[in-house]
Amino acid sequence: MLRELTSTTMILHWTKMLTVFILFENVKGWNSSSDTVTVPDIINLQALDMWRLEMEWMMNQNEEERNQTYEIQVGRTTNMDIVDSMNVSKRSLEAVHTLVWTSQLPLNCVDHSVRIRFISEASPPSSWSSWKTIYGEMNLAHNQIRLFPDEQVLREGSTVMFCCIFPTETHITSLFFGKTLYEVINISPRVKAIRVENINATNSFGVIFYHDRNSEAAHNFVTFPPEKPFDFRCETEDMRLVYCSWKIQRAPNLTGDRRRKYTLLISDSKAVGCDVENTDHPSCGFDVIQQQITYNTTLLVTNSLGQASETYIFNITDRVFPVPEHLEVTAGVFDSLVILQLDGCFKGLLLICQIELEPGGIKQDLDKNGSDSMQYYAFKLQHLKPSTQYSIRGRCAVQGNDWGRWTTQRLFITEPLVTIDLWRQIRDHPNRTVTLLWKTVSSDSELYIEAYNGCVSYRNTERNVCMTITQTQVELTRDLNMSDITVRAVIQSGLSEPAHITIPSAYIMPREKRIMGNEKGFQLTWTRDSTTTCDYIVEWCMLGVALPCNLQWRKVPANQSSLNLNAEPTQRPTLYSSPNITWSSVNLKWSFNEKDPSHTGFITRYVIMVQDDSEAASNLSYFIQSVDDPCSKSWMVSGLEEDRSYTFQLAACTSAGCGPETTAVFRTRKNFYLLMVKVLVPLVVLVGCCVCLWSYRNLIRGFPEEAFGFLHVKALDLDEDLYEASEKIHTLMIEDCKWCDVEILDVRPITTEKPWLTGAEDQSCSFITPEVTPPSCHLTTDLTNFTYVSCVQQDLPSEELQTEATKQESEISGFSSDYVTSSHATMVQIHSPGQSQSRGALSSANQIAVSGRQQQQL
């Protein structure tokens, strides 16, 4: 038994010894195997910015493997919480390797540590290197809350963590990004963070990150990397400076220092920085390189998140698009001169310039060889209309290339057409004189004529006398050698086209002859003169006016031997809309050119008809007033009722009748003075009565109260008594105005209201005015028919015609204003130097007589 026990003990002992030996050998093998793999050494760890961490380590020189793998771990905080682990393969044989790691949490928030080990396929991995740490700002001594990131540009669509570092005694419960509350992540006892995924691009004002403790906030911006520009092109307008333009797919959202930067890289030249302010039409320029034809340009676009580029190669002669530097217009009446000014180095190039005129769309082209100096292209525009606004623009091109851009449109107005209708009066008695008269017609109604320039030339001599005239006529002493007379209008732009007239050396005064007119006017006829080669001149003036009168004339073509002259006005006066109005009168003012040559007759007066528009007025409540001075442009209409509407009609008249009327409605003002009198008079009477009774106040006190019992009248009883009294005396009744006198007259019908034009030499014609009967109560109305009578003597009693009112009316409106017309037949040659006008031959002389408007009471 003892021997068996000893054997068993020995077996167990040796078994233990063998086991220990085997374990020792395995451990020894492991240690020797591990010691053959070198541990990588981190030689440098630094923060490139708030997000990127760069580490450098030494390579294992003992390993012959070209493909070396390393395992790298990133820890956070003092607890070395592993936040990222990665395997990195390196094939280079360089001794130092570099790795850049990007963090979602700003490196400023907490400490970040890195360690590394080598991994080999043939042996176990090496031991881990020591931790290498870059410290955050949570360990800095401060008592303020810090927010990160702040004032940073973030990438659109990325996931970003925002942290808050706060003192130990501070408690942060919520964090916001923009206006959104996010779930708080505890990073460390003094650091909290939020995680924002897929952040959106902001505007130029950015977005804020803040907490719930106070108003502190971090301000950041979110944008996107630049995109590759498209439609990148370069061109030149003057062969001195090249402009490159491009288009942007997506407009940048940041400005200032955070905006994109553009750089032009030109072959064989330095880089050119571009200051791009307008992102809708971005462009950049550089100087042309002498003797260089082909250009290789690259546009580089960068911002804090990346860069993009585009290249364009071109031949500069194919990219020349000239643009005129200046466009000048010299406007005339029918023609205008346009000059395009082109500046550049275009020597050796054939240029084409073009202008376009609107309205009309007229285009003109002009070719010219280019040069290195200023060039001018002159275009003449013809067949334009006077006093008309046009627009002009121009463009140029190199032959074979596309057109350059248009210049800015230039507006211009052609000069007004000023036509002078020149005529003369020649007299031998009492003195030999020549009176020049002219009428000016302009295409611009607002044209101001400063003066006139008149020049007289003489026969058989070079003598030429010029003078400045401010009127439309001038009287000259007649000289037998006087030949041609020229008159021009002086306007702002210079002188108008001249008007010529030739003074004959011998002159025969025309004869006058009276003719009869009708309601259509005066029909003039004369015998045609075979010697007339140009035209006839018909002249007339008002009958009874001493010479020189307001002479009128009209040109008639040489193939015509008749002329119809109308006598009634065709234009209406213009009433001003703001007259001076009182409670009883309206001071009318108007404008009318009574001396306008376009009038077919002489303006002798104005007629004003006033109509009461109130409901109380009858249809016959109107009256007519006459302004006999044609030069007067105002008239006071008085005798009106207060606060009433009146219609005023104004017309200009000749001796043949009145023209179209101008109508205006005005309302008189209220008479506040009368209202004050109506109010104050009863008050004054009441005060006077009180003053008179005040001295009897003691006497009245002695009477018993019953004596004045009749004064205790109720308000209702007083109203009834007043009503009964008013019914008896008719003081409160509203009545229509009654006529005291009504006179019914026989109204003789007439077929037309147009005036008859009669011969002025018949003295039997005279004005017959209506009888005016003064009203005996309120108003008396006579129904009167106004017409015009012929020259037949009327068998009417003188008692019916000769009344006091008739005499007064005759003194106001009676006049005789007729027309004197004479016709001249003249033979005029085409005006040219050295030629003169032949003597006019007298054809006939007629006198036009127009009777004044006549009235007859029937």
Image: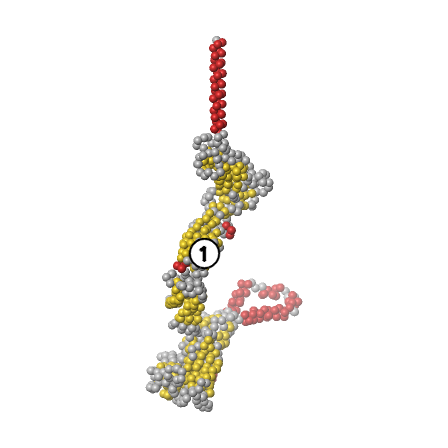
Residue 755 visible somewhere in the drawing: no
Location of residue 376 in the rendering, given as x and y in whole percent from the top left corner: 43, 68
Residue at 39%, 82% (x, y): give it.
832
The amino acid sitting under disc 1 is Ser
Q: How many marks?
A: 1
Q: Residues within 10 Å of mark 1 (few under 14, many from 20)?
A: many
Q: Position of residue 800 (x, y in %)?
A: 43, 85
Quarter assignment of residue 363: bottom left
User: In the image, is residue 792 above or below residue 142?
Assistant: below
Q: Is residue 211 left or right of residue 821?
A: right
Residue 223, image x, y percentages: 47, 48
Q: Name the residue furthest right.
A: 698
Q: Which residue is mark 1?
A: 283
- In the foreground, 687 or 624: 624
Q: Pick whichever, 378 or 795, lies toward us.
A: 378
Q: Nearer the viewer, residue 841 or 505?
A: 505
Q: Tell me which colouring the rendered structure shows.
A: secondary structure
Rendered view: 259 above or below 829? above
In this rendering, is residue 587 above or below 789? Answer: above
Residue furthest top as drawn: 1
Q: Quadrant of the C terminus?
A: bottom left
Task: Give 856 or 311, whichever is nearer the viewer.
Answer: 311
Q: Can residue 237 be seen from the camera position used here?
A: yes
- Is residue 635 placed above or below 167 in the rendered structure? below
Residue name at image x 47 percent, y 35 percent: 70
Residue at horizontal 52%, vertical 38%? 43
x and y percentages locating residue 345 in the rendered image: 44, 63
Question: Is 232 displayed left or right of 179 in the figure?
Answer: left
Q: Residue furthest bottom?
A: 430
Of helix, strand and loop, which one carries label 1? Answer: strand
